[in-house]
Image (cartoon, rainbow, N blue to C red):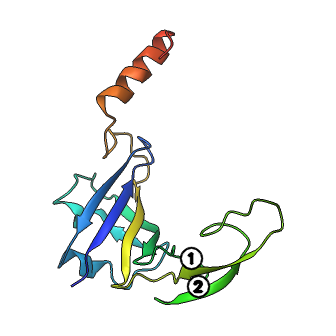
Amino acid sequence: MPTFKLVLSDPISGKARQFEIKDPLAQRFIGLKIGDELDGSVLKDFLELPKGAKIRITGGSGIEGAPMHPGVPGPVKRYILADGPPGYWPPKRGMRKRKLVRGNTISDSIVQINAVIVYPQGYSGPPAIPLGAKEIEKLTKAKEGTPA
């Protein structure tokens, strides 16, 4: 019985929210790969998305903290020689390091799934994850020209 933390990002508002996904909804995510899209209506219990919106899987991490890597096929753990993200940010150009990563497929050993909302073409409505009161206040002050 898998349980995931879904971190869903909204490109319009720039905000992210975290949801805990349990069975039977969690079974819909098993087998999806990085870059796959899922219909937005599956999250109707958590968030109201506009009609036609989709959810694109962008990554995740396993129970040991290893990030999912798009270049490693399957639901496996592998050591790769990494020269850049995800999983390794070299302090100097050209540096490489052997790092543990997860494959690009979601399995029951994945704990966190990162995803982004893909709005329908030409959508101009409000964001699905709205701005908070402090962010709105900062934006209105910035428009008026007063420092925040």
Residue 111, image quadrant: bottom left
Quarter holding the N terminus?
bottom left
Q: Is residue 124 left or right of residue 1?
A: right
**Which disc is residue 72 wearing?**
2
Q: Which mark is residue 69?
A: 1
Q: Secondary structure at mark 2?
A: loop
Q: Quadrant of residue 20?
A: bottom left
In this view of the protein, can residue 73 be seen by the observer?
no
Question: Regarding mark 1 in the picture, which secondary structure is present there?
Answer: loop
For the residue marked with disc 2, what is the amino acid?
A: Val
- Local crowd at mark 2 within 10 Å, few (<14), some, or many (≥20)? some
Q: Quadrant of residue 45?
A: bottom left
Q: Amino acid at mark 1?
A: His
Label 1 packing within 10 angstroms: few (<14), some (14-19), many (20+): many
Residue at x-position 47% and y-position 15%? 143
Q: Position of residue 91 (x, y in %)?
A: 75, 59
Q: Determine the CA span between mark 1 and mark 2.
A: 6 Å
Q: Residue at x 38, y 29 (%)?
A: 135
Point out residue 63 in the picture as x, y percentages from the top left corner: 39, 78
Q: Look at the numbered discs 1 and 2 and tell me whether their residues touch, using CB distance below 8 Å.
A: yes
| Residue 37, position as x, y percentages in the image | 41, 70
Name the foreground residue: 45 vs 122: 45
